[in-house]
Image (cartoon, rainbow, N blue to C red):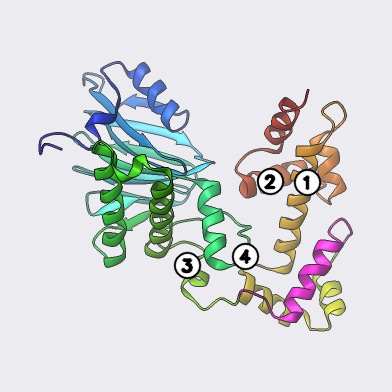
Amino acid sequence: MPADEPPLANHQLFHTADIWEARAEVGRAFCPHDLRIVQRSATLDARLHGAPFDRTGLYYLDYGTEVRITPGDLESFFLVQIPLAGYAEITCGREEIISSPELASVPSPAGKLDMRWGGGNPQLIVWLDRAAMEAHLGSLLGRTVRRPISFSLGMNLTTPGSRSWLNIVDLMRREAEGPGGMTSRPIVTKQLESLLMTQLLMAQPHNYSPALHGEQPRVAPPAVRRAMEIIEAHAAEPLTVAEIAECVGVGVRALQEGFRRHLDTTPLAYLREVRLDHVRKELLSGDPGTTTVTAVAARWGFLHPGRFSVAYRRQFGEPPSQTLRRACALRP
């Protein structure tokens, strides 16, 4: 790539001065969002280059002027946004940073995202599928990941771990730019994507970092394992932590500590996650003419529709009604 060319120049998706076109094309690559030019007299000079792979993708995005971008929740994917120059104000949930070439932003899917990119702030963006990331983390931990991954918003790009991750990003970018590069081979791309996800999970702090960096047994101790079996077998019934502890033969505090230490959760949170899994299975296999979200949720102990909907969306990245609509659409 010539020195004066931006990254992924041979993968241009669009180049426009029309804000409506820019909004639509970026929305098609990522997700629907609102896009506004901060200074009315300014001229947009937007361009997007993109190399999507299977579970990840690399993009170069530049608006050419100061803009405000408000996508809300990302829901189904993670982003790592790396400014190549300038700065950006990034707010995600309760966190807020000033992003720069030394500090990337890693907004999590469940936090409402609001960004203000300064003029002269082109960014290299790494896109990662949420379901693939959670499955990959589960394979590293040796257990199912039931809670969403939540990264710290700011990623210090000067640390050894971050620099190693950037080396992987740069390798994938260079291979995507060259004809017949490694990313043109699905088997190789799969390995590179796994390495990219592993190193990001190791380098950037998140809510599973203590478990990932510690020595995690692949099989929980007998008492915790037995409690899990009881919860899974009786998830549709009213259960309390005291009842579960009594069945296992340990105290409540000991059971709670066991779940915290070995599963990074609590017995009641695990029960809720199991019930949500059952709800999802029923929605995906239900009769389109008779199945309702409210009835299925109530059958698994969720009697407050609002709280249930929030919990379901947090665990699966979509509202329950969307799951049911998709299941109905797949049926004749």
Q: Which residue is mark 1?
A: 279
Q: Which residue is mark 4?
A: 143
Residue displayed at 30% across by 50% down: 169
Instruction: Please provide the residue range marked out in magenta.
Output: 218-238
Residue displayed at 24% across by 30% down: 10
Q: Which residue is mark 3?
A: 209
Q: Quadrant of residue 274?
A: bottom right
Q: Is 240 in front, or is 226?
A: 226
Q: CA distance from mark 4 to mark 2?
A: 20 Å
Amino acid bearing label 4: Arg
Amino acid bearing label 1: Val
Amino acid bearing label 2: Tyr
Position of residue 314 in the picture relative to residue 98 (left or right): right
Q: Kindly state the secondary structure of the residue where label 1 is placed.
A: helix
Query: Could you tell me which quadrant the N terminus lies in?
Result: top left
From this view, report whether residue 68 is shown above or below residue 102. above
Q: CA distance from mark 1 to mark 2?
A: 9 Å
Q: Pointers 1 and 2 in contact (CB under 8 A)?
A: yes
Amino acid bearing label 3: Ser
Q: Pointers 3 and 4 in contact (CB under 8 A)?
A: no
Kindly report which numbered mark, 3 or 4, lies closer to the viewer in this rendering. 4
220 drawn magenta: yes
Q: Give residue 56's position: percent from left, percent from top.
A: 42, 44
Tag on residue 312? 2
Kindly report which numbered mark, 4 or 1, lies closer to the viewer in this rendering. 4
Sequence-wise, the earlier of marks 4 and 2 is 4
Q: Kindly state the secondary structure of the residue where label 4 is placed.
A: loop
Q: Is 106 in front, or is 114?
A: 106
Mark 3, other Cα within 10 Å: few <14 / some 14–19 / many ≥20: some
From this view, report whether residue 234 is shown above or below residue 313. below
Residue displayed at 85% across by 31% down: 287
